[in-house]
Amino acid sequence: MNWKHLPIVAFDVETTGLEPFNGDRVIEVGLVQMYLDDDGTVAERIDHSFLINPGIPIPHAVVKLTGISDSDVADKPPFDEVAEKIYEVLSGAITVAHNYTFDLAFLSQEFKREDMRWPEPMAEVDTLALSRICFPDARSHRLGEVCSRMGIPLENAHRATDDAAACGHVFINLARKYQVEDNLQAMLNWSNAIGRPPDNSPFGPNEDGVLAFLDGPYIGEPIASHPLHLAWFDKARVRRDGDWHWRYPESVRDWTRRWLEVRGSGGGRGTSKTFHKSDWVLDPCIASPRRMTS
């Protein structure tokens, strides 16, 4: 599949705090759709910006950081009124975010409140991880620093649409710089991103639309609930014709290793989002193992 012919949706959220599983809510969502021409440059861009009434007060630290106050969202819709549109834009796209797990955690929780699931994007690219791959010696991988390093403008940092657009251009510009092949799997390998499970894999959506096991003792349960069992799929062998053989094909084992590395290792080391000088880390497998899907 040619990834450059797919819509690229960079997204970002601003929130009332850092704890999506402990009551903090989304106050702004920015979605930037980008369509590429044949040489990999942006031919069309469509912005979707939503200020959202969270139903709870916005802390002073957040107002200071984002400029978004209670009065700014007082007459704005709650998340449930924009959920379908956000879902529609994200579905079937190459999705891009800076510190993807943060934005994913908040949007997943908001969707959950509306009895909706995380949509099925074609890929989930984290430009924070991509910066570490492409600039291993850099002292900082904050979005603003990455943009400065690459000459990408970011005039309104900590506003969702501006941050989303910036990280989208980071991804596209790096893909052009490294001449990434117009093949979806090649792009996933280069960016260390998660795509959909391979065809005929032992993973797929359960009745709630959450990525789950289709085989084994945890059949029907989310893979994120059992990361140790998920790791077994990479190591499982069967005895056949007097010798040991891999139980699952290389494509399944590759996907399993990628998912565990990106979602399950707790390898986050900081982010551009901070209310203080210190960074924070969110490990989704620990924070909410039943809701983080791929």
Image (tube, helix red, strand yellow):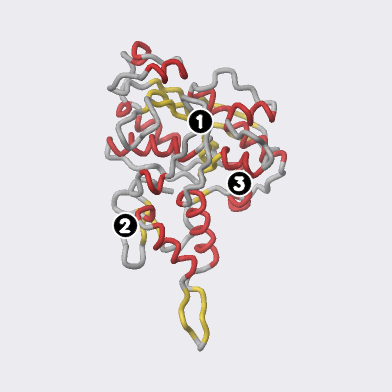
**Which amino acid, by three-letter code, is at mark 3?**
Ser
Question: Is residue 198 depicted above or below 72 in this figure?
Answer: below
Question: Is residue 183 depicted above or below 165 in this figure?
Answer: below
Q: Residue at x 58, y 31 (%)?
A: 142
**Disc 2 target residue:** 221
Task: Kindly report the distance in space between the C-alpha atoms of the residues bearing marks 1 and 3.
Answer: 26 Å
Task: Kindly report the distance in space between the C-alpha atoms of the residues bearing marks 1 and 2.
Answer: 36 Å
The spot of residue 195 in percent (x, y) is 51, 50
Q: Residue at x 40, y 31 (%)?
A: 18
Mark identifier at residue 250: none
Left/right placement of residue 181 relative to residue 263 reads: right
Q: Nearer the viewer, mark 1 or mark 2?
A: 1
**Disc 3 target residue:** 191
**Disc 1 target residue:** 278
Q: Residue at x 69, y 29 (%)?
A: 149
**Which amino acid, by three-letter code, is at mark 2?**
Glu
Q: Nearer the viewer, mark 1 or mark 3?
A: 1
Q: Residue at x 41, y 45 (%)?
A: 284
